[in-house]
């Protein structure tokens, strides 16, 4: 027998069409789920912003609408919030916990690395998710390159590298492996950049070079 599911008609709010959480369920309109945003994110620091659900953009980002100003919408994360209502803090705690990175993603989206995951890897994975919940937004992790490109071994100072499982990995004639020693401890608060490169000063990568089937960042040799 086909079951009938009763659905509630969604409220029509300008700019809020199809605002749903990651499961496709919109958060019911509830003015208890409010936050106040930091300067730069709000026209008025006294405004309260109602949480509507996931922004469906980046991990940790959620969609808010200014209460009493329905035309004002933002995609924000907890780092952009100055004040939380108790109900909003509770909702966001569950929201962030549900967006933690999986072990497979942490291990470079590699079945091989996942199968050989060590206790040290698991400790870094747990610490990574704790830092994510504290920050409220995700930092990027690289996938283990599937293509073996020997030409990458010619990169020096630094070698061709990727950030996998919370560590810097480098490429040599024998393939990919964790850098030993690691060039610097990872703080967990900023995207991984190879220390001493111009990308650290600039805050982002720039200019790519195709090396066979792999793309190499010219300034710092990130893959």
Image (spheres, rainbow, N blue to C red):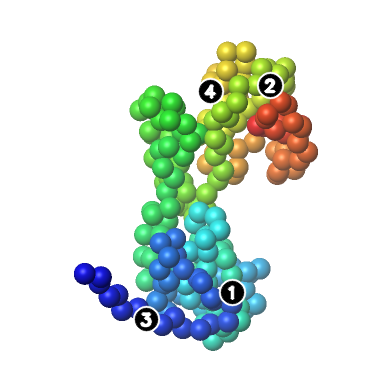
Going from the N terminus, do you reach mark 4 or mark 1 first? 1
Give the quarter of the image for residue 76.
bottom right
Going from the N terminus, do you reach mark 3 or mark 4 first? 3
Q: Which mark is nearer the camera, 2 or 4?
A: 2
Going from the N terminus, do you reach mark 2 or mark 4 first? 2
| Neighbours of disc 2 within 10 Å: few (<14), some (14-19), many (20+) | many
Residue position marked by numbered label 4 in the rendering: 178
| Neighbours of disc 3 within 10 Å: few (<14), some (14-19), many (20+) | few
Most extreme residue toward the left is 1
Residue 186 visible in image = no
Residue position marked by numbered label 3 in the rendering: 8
Q: Secondary structure at mark 2?
A: helix
Going from the N terminus, do you reach mark 1 or mark 2 first? 1
Residue position marked by numbered label 2 in the rendering: 152
Going from the N terminus, do you reach mark 3 or mark 2 first? 3
Q: Which mark is nearer the camera, 3 or 4?
A: 3
Residue position marked by numbered label 1 in the rendering: 73
């Amino acid at each position: 027998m086909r079951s009938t599911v009763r659905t509630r008609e969604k409220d029509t709010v300008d700019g809020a069409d199809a605002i749903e959480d990651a499961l496709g369920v919109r958060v019911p309109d509830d003015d208890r789920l409010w936050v106040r945003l930091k300067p730069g994110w709000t026209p008025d620091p006294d405004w309260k912003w109602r949480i509507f659900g996931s922004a469906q953009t980046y991990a940790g980002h959620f969609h808010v609408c200014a209460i009493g100003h329905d035309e004002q919408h933002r995609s924000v994360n907890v780092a952009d919030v100055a004040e939380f209502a108790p109900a909003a803090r509770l909702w966001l705690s569950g929201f962030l916990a549900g967006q933690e990175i999986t072990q497979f993603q942490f291990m470079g989206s590699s079945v091989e690395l996942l199968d050989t995951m060590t206790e040290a890897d698991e400790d870094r994975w747990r610490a990574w998710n704790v830092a994510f919940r504290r920050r409220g937004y995700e930092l990027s992790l690289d996938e283990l390159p599937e293509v073996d490109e020997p030409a990458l071994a010619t990169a020096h100072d630094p070698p061709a590298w990727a950030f996998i499982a919370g560590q810097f990995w480098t490429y040599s004639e024998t393939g990919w492996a964790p850098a030993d020693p690691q060039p610097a401890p990872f703080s967990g608060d900023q995207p991984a950049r190879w220390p001493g490169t111009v990308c650290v000063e600039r805050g982002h990568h720039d200019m790519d070079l195709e090396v066979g089937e792999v793309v190499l960042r010219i300034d710092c040799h990130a893959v």
